[in-house]
Image (cartoon, helix red, strand yellow):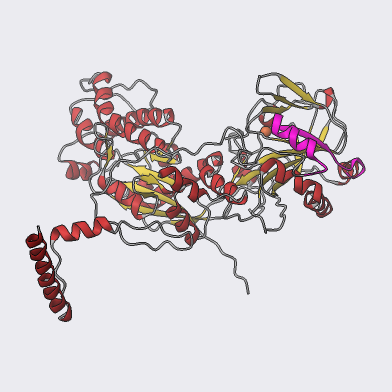
Amino acid sequence: MDTEFETVLPVYIVGDSHSLPYKNMVFREKWTGAFVMAHTKYIPGITAKDFYNPATGEFHPDFIAFLEYEGLVRNGRATHLSMDEVDFSIAKAVGQAVRPPLIMLTIGEIDVRGPIMQLLKDSHDFVPPFPTTLPVLDKPLVPWDLIDEAIEARLRPFAAGLEHLVRAGFKRVYVQSIVPPSRQEARVKELQSYECPVTVRTKLVQAYNWKLGAKVRSLNLVMVDRWNDLTADGLLRPEFDFDGVHVPPKGARLLLEGLIDDAIDSRGLVANHPRYELYYQMACGLNPFQAAKSNAT
Amino acid sequence: MAVGSMIRTATQRLKGGVNQALGALGYQLVRTETLGGLSGFFEPAPPSAAGVESRPAAVQPRRLTLLPAANAAPAMCTAHAPKFDPQKTPSQLADKIVEFQQNGVTVISTNPEKAATFRETESFDRDVSNRHSAWDWAGNSVAPYTKDLQTGIPSAALLDYLHGLFSGGDFDSFFRGVLGCPAQVANVRLVRSLPHETAGVGPQEWHSDGCPAGVIRGVLYLCDVDTQTGPFQYRDAGGKEHTVLGKTGDLLVFDATRLMHRGSPPSHKTRSAIDLVFMPRMPGEDMKIMVVGMNHWPADPFFVKLPKERAADQEAVAGRATSLY
Ligand SMILES: [Fe+2]
């Protein structure tokens, strides 16, 4: 009997420890009924600042290693857009459609918790340039431009890395927004060795996401954001308050569904033009690899 | 000179002897430079298309940059068709092939009675929501992007008719002429455009389809199309606007990437048509006609899996922005 051949839709999720709640996650999405499966890579300590080095054009080695391991990159090239005979043979052996991969980065939370939050700790508050329901505490205020510059310093290299990814042919890259921070003040103090009130921490994450979202959109990419589902009264809902840093898998699932909801309607990006070029040439009786060889010599 | 050569030969013999002796004991001795030379010498040969096995490349430091790569539609979709010569390749549709090659568009008349019958028997009973969304197909949004268009799934009779029409000698030679290879049908979609006064959206706006290489489009009119029925319009290479009026049964075939075009919004009368997507077919394969609803073309022509139709999740669809990607 002919069994139906079904494969999962992989989503490659890579970054700091916020990639961990996605580990081994699999579910059926509601649009086509396909299984979504997270392929995760935890890169300990990776930050927005060291994801990419704009001076050298180099990515974090573990990030490239992950792309290579997953077969998304070979010899510095996006394999899905390759017209190389080796990649063609690999795709043939895999026997599945070659699509631009869905990738999500979970990077930036360490930047917020570290250098940016240090500007405020429990001694200061700030007023962001966007509306928020969170209060301004009776503390001295740090001017927005200082916060803005601190975030910018971390985001600039990250955005340059995203732009490089797009140029390399990865146009279905998502960035997970920073999740709302924990309300467990004691746990946070234990983790960070300093205090910072939850409203200030949350507002800071909002500010980071606000700037991150704008940068990501300017590159025609999407920030995955389920803030309204994860919060109540402006703060993290207790059911998603897990270990003081991460959302639990059910929160991660909400975010991954957000990615899927966007991806299902961005299928204009799905067509693989280099593969059509190969197919068309072969249908016309041409040998695309022969042409490449004689061009090379 | 001769002495130097003798010494080298003796050294080679000695090395050979040592290596043989070590080899017999299961060992191998290779100097670092030799190893470097060897791995440099044995660069992996390009493997044959049949196999992916190759010698492992020399260990290199990991490359941490990524090279630029484009995934863009070509400027024209029929670049590999040789210039058509009607003397060398006689065809009933030779003048249409020449016209297509010159202008990127041609109109071929087909059986008007058949077309008129299908206008009455086919059911245009759906909105343009995409019920065949699939991760392996490029296509329209899940939620309908307009109320001015209705669609439907073609009947078996219509598919039979189209299969016969496009497999016939005339169309076979036509596709070989315009594409340079045989064609198959990646999608058949019924489209009814209702008269409206508002500006057109989606296919009724000026656009280029961004079709992949080898993919061209067709519109088979199921009614007469005059200026009030929203005729097809395109801009030629010089930017001049052309309006293609048509009779029932006329089939427009065009390069939807080469030409900016639109189905102009019908002002007074309903236009019924069949939207077609043609893509290359490997010689030796059979003509196939796929029905994929509001999708356009497969993501990867080498691995094509027909998307399943699903009942729309009304609640989920209702919450969506109704935009084209
Ligand atoms: Fe079009």
Near-viewer residue (A225 or A3): A3
Does the magenta run of residues contain B103?
A: yes
Quarter where residue B9 is shown: bottom left
Residue at left offset 24%, top offset 31%: A55
Image side of residue A291 versus residue B130, left or right: left
The percent position of residue A131, horizontal first and vertical second, equals 39, 23
The percent position of residue B92, horizontal first and vertical second, equals 83, 43
> Which quarter of the rendering shows the N terminus of chain A?
bottom right
Relative to B86, residue A243 above or below: below
Instruction: In the displayed orientation, state which residue is furthest to the bottom.
Output: B24
Relative to B3, residue B25 above or below: below
Residue at left offset 38%, top offset 54%: A70
Residue at left offset 57%, top offset 49%: A286
Q: Is residue A82 visible?
A: no
The percent position of residue B288, horizontal first and vertical second, equals 71, 55
Does the magenta run of residues contain A8?
A: no
> Which quarter of the rendering shows the C terminus of chain A?
top left
Part of the protein shown in magenta: B90-114
Relative to A73, residue B14 above or below: below
Which quarter holds ligand 1? top right
